[in-house]
Image (spheres, rainbow, N blue to C red):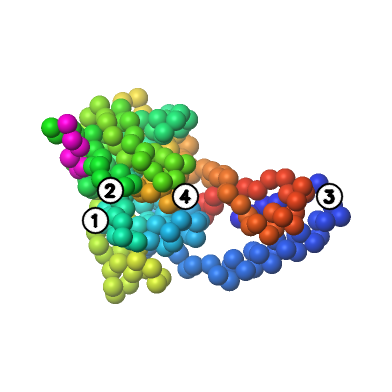
Amino acid sequence: MKCLFYKNYGLKVVLLGIVMLMMLGSTAMATPITRLSTFDGWDVLAEDSHSDAYGGSKFEADFLFYKLDGEELSLGLQTRFDVEDGKIYWNEKKYYAGDLALSFDGDTSGSGGSGYEYAVDFGLHTHDYYGYDHVSFIQSGGNDTGTDPQGLYGGVTWRNDLLHPESAPFAMDDSSGKITDALVSNETNTGDDENPLWHNGYKTYYRKIVLNLANVSGVSSADDVDVHWTMSCGNDEIDGHIIGGNPVPEPTTIALLGIGLAGFGGGYLRRRRRQKKSA
Ligand SMILES: [Ca+2]
Ligand SMILES: [Ca+2]
Ligand SMILES: [Ca+2]
């Protein structure tokens, strides 16, 4: 939802009219992205914009879901990026899925995603943006293997060879080690259509993990949980935040509402902000 704030009430009616027309337009053009039926019964942790990825649909992160049952935390990612085998080939270049970044202390500040001290590795083979360098915490002969065993890792540092650095953190570069399995599920069948990868006209993929928070030192279900995910270019990202078992919508600044409107609004356009929705 786009919100505008004006000082000049003389222009208010005119600008509100324009905004309403834009909203009607975006509604008419909206893509019918809804939750996969495999996430029926889960809560929405974050619903990202369904049309904000650089490079288009193949890079769209759409939803994070969660379930909290005592100390057992389930997290789900729904994205049109291929997180089944973890890579796509597009425009003569390969792109790779990142790891799921987690923080349990309510603080995600710090450069390069250093506020995310934990990662769930999907066990995928990961490269940097240019596709030259493997990315993993397991070093072999001085070279990354590119693949870590799936699971929850602590003491994580991040590798951020991103085209869009604002999407950091990307992939686990180092770690104090694997804490526990995370029971990754990436069944091909999305449960929605006859062709299992298709959902409402788009190829759609998902990953599910289950963590027992009792395995994470000093963490309980009542604590803050921050979740972040992106891919090797950073073309899109998604962020979720749970406090005391409830999701918190997080505002994110958008680049520009539109050159035309920005020009028209001029000095009256004080602030542009996108509020990430939590349905
Ligand atoms: Ca998106
Ligand atoms: Ca943190
Ligand atoms: Ca990895």
Instruction: Identify the element where label 4 is drawn.
Output: strand
Q: Does the Cβ of the disc 4 residue fall within 8 Å of ligand 1?
A: no
Query: Which tag is nearer the camera, tag 2 or tag 4?
Result: 2
In terms of secondary structure, what is the magenta stretch mainly?
loop
Label 4 sits on residue: 46
| Residue indicated by mark 3 | 8
Q: Which residue is painted at 67% across and 52% down in the image?
A: 3
Q: Which residues are magenta?
A: 142-147
Task: Please state which amino acid type lies under the numbered disc 4.
Answer: Ala
Q: Quadrant of residue 19?
A: bottom right
Position of residue 160 in the picture relative to residue 215 (left or right): right
Q: Nearer the viewer, mark 1 or mark 2?
A: 2
Q: CA distance from mark 2 to mark 3?
A: 50 Å
Q: Looking at the image, tell me whether mark 2 or mark 3 is earlier in sequence order.
A: 3
- Three-letter amino acid code at the position of disc 1: Asp
Q: Residues within 10 Å of mark 3 (few under 14, many from 20)?
A: few
Look at mark 2 in the image and give the residue it sits on: 131
Categorize mark 1 by other alpha carbons within 10 Å: few (<14), some (14-19), many (20+): some
Q: Earlier in the sequence, mark 4 or mark 1?
A: 4
Q: Nearer the viewer, mark 4 or mark 3?
A: 3
Q: CA distance from mark 3 to mark 1?
A: 53 Å
Q: Circle 3 — which element?
A: loop
**Is 145 in front, or is 225?**
145
Query: Could you tell me if the residues under marks 2 and 4 are in contact, i.e. CB atoms within 8 Å?
Result: no
Q: Hey, what amino acid is under mark 3?
A: Asn
